[in-house]
Image (cartoon, helix red, strand yellow):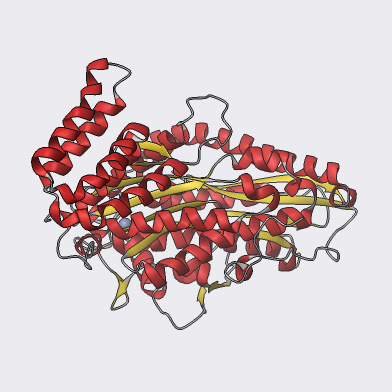
Amino acid sequence: MSYFNNNKKFKPYIQKPKDISSILADEMTIVSGDFYGIQKFIFDRLSTKNASKVLRAKSAFVQIFTEYLAKYICHKLQIDENRILTRNAGIFEIAVPFVNVDIESIQKDVDEYFIKNFYGLSGVVLTKVECKKEDFKDPIKYKKLRERIINSIQNKKFKKFNLNKDTQYVLNYDSGIDNQNLCKVCNIRKSKKEGENCDICDNFIKLGKKLSYEHQEELISSKEVGIEFNGFETDINLDKKIKSYVLFKQYTPVTFEELAENSCIDEDSGTKALAILKADIDNMGKFLEKSSVTSSFEAFDAFSKSIDNFFSLYIPKLMSQKYKNTYTIFAGGDDLFLLGAWNEILELAREIEKDFKEFVAGDAKTLTISFGITLAKPSTPISYLANYTEELLEEAKDIDNGKEVKNPKDAIALFREVVKWDDYKETYSNLENLFKDFDKNVTTATLYSLLKFCDMSKNVKNDIKNTIWRSKLNYLFNRNIDTKYHNILGKLSDSIEKHPEATKMFLSEFIYKRRQA
Ligand SMILES: [Zn+2]
């Protein structure tokens, strides 16, 4: 069963399953790790001024830490690292060839590390599920095993979150920190000296520079990024997934001001702003539960790694080639968090949506991605933007209002509207054509009138008086617009009637592209 389009474009991202024939044992334990609170870990209390220097590195740290921990566990249990089944996007699974594995002592090491360095706002939960060789041989048994793994992680995460509320409370009494010695990057830890950063933030800044070295892959010692448990040190390969894509200038990530300044550079005018994009696959849990993907280790392994490749390799490659004024905050697993010059982010979103639908095949054809996108000035606090964009993504996913529909979710929230991708794409391509020549001859006041008509059309149901938008549109054309453009009136009017929200999205983008900064 193939879940992906094996064409030239996507073939490099489709992964074969790991060969586990030699590592299966009669009695086994699957040890899983899951980095929780990633968004908190990356954004919490981060000052906007320094954000671009450390955001990417903090996200890379999540991957580096996950890899380190998987290796540390192999070292502690004295098993070969080949037993690590997967390690993507903050998650790992290890097939341990015996039972009665003590993960509690390792969990304690992890918890202490996060409390000491990151005040326990985030961390990794470790769980174990004992199983037998047959569980890997029988489709029904393997599906059950996957469910047990997922449940064990969910349960432990749930407990951790509750526990952390109390820990945080206690840690607020941490002494000896005042305005003078507070690190200006994280706003949590004590700096080394007044006016300097803390050690951990300095490590992130150094790591950020390393991620910029384009000359292929290289190793970094875990100690260099401040990770060391009981003297265990290992090298981590800074591969393409960890490096991802960020626009650099002299080995330093460009500031968010610069990214905003670089918007609309191909046009004569246009608003200078950032866009923040958050996206993930719709109903992934349900899909895994119901599809044949979880009927064998091989199918699941190939599926989840290929999906991860799309997010962590294919998209950053697209960005590096076509959308250079962008910055990956996070890209992996089945989700995405990007920012950049607003016009490039909007185009990138449309390309990702289109490519993902081309990438998936067979059973996976039903998978879709929803998006939340915010436009903002680069001075807006980044943690606020992260939360706000997250809310937009939730709004996009709520588009069906709990109703059963043929293609659930599959939506985009942008410019204060939420629409289905199909409607957005249809409207966008129709209007793009109509507006090609019309562009130079339309005044901004006219465009704002069109936006108003969209709002009226949206609200016809609430107030019948709003139907007047149609005659107002005719009047506007007769009064202000050259007769040679009157041929577009019919189609424009249809668009405002049929898809007022999507038409608004198109018009807003159009206005922002014309407007002076
Ligand atoms: Zn700091």
Which of these two is toward me, 466 or 349? 466
Expressed as whole percent of the image width and height from the top left, the position of residue 480 reads 9, 42
Position of 458 relative to 241 (above/below) = above
Please name the residue shown 24% across and 27% down the image.
456
Expressed as whole percent of the image width and height from the top left, the position of residue 423 reads 43, 41
Please name the residue shown 41% across and 79% down the image.
213
Position of 240 relative to 294 (above/below) = below
Please name the residue shown 42% across and 46% down the image.
426
Is residue 411 in view from this perspective? yes
Quadrant position of residue 316: bottom left
Q: Is 408 left or right of 451, judged from the image as shown? A: right
Expressed as whole percent of the image width and height from the top left, the position of residue 464 reads 27, 16
- Across the whole image, how many numbered discs are drawn on residues? 0
Quadrant position of residue 14: bottom right
Which of these two is toward me, 425 or 32? 425
Quadrant position of residue 500: top left
Which quadrant: the N terminus?
bottom right
Ligand 1's quadrant is bottom left
Q: Is 274 left or right of 482, judged from the image as shown? A: right
Position of 210 relative to 38 (above/below) = below
Expressed as whole percent of the image width and height from the top left, the position of residue 196 reads 23, 63
Q: Is 341 left or right of 25, judged from the image as shown? A: left
Which of these two is toward me, 323 or 15? 323
Is residue 415 in view from this perspective? no
Which of these two is toward me, 16 or 96? 16
Please name the residue shown 21% across and 28% down the image.
469
Which quadrant: the C terminus?
bottom left
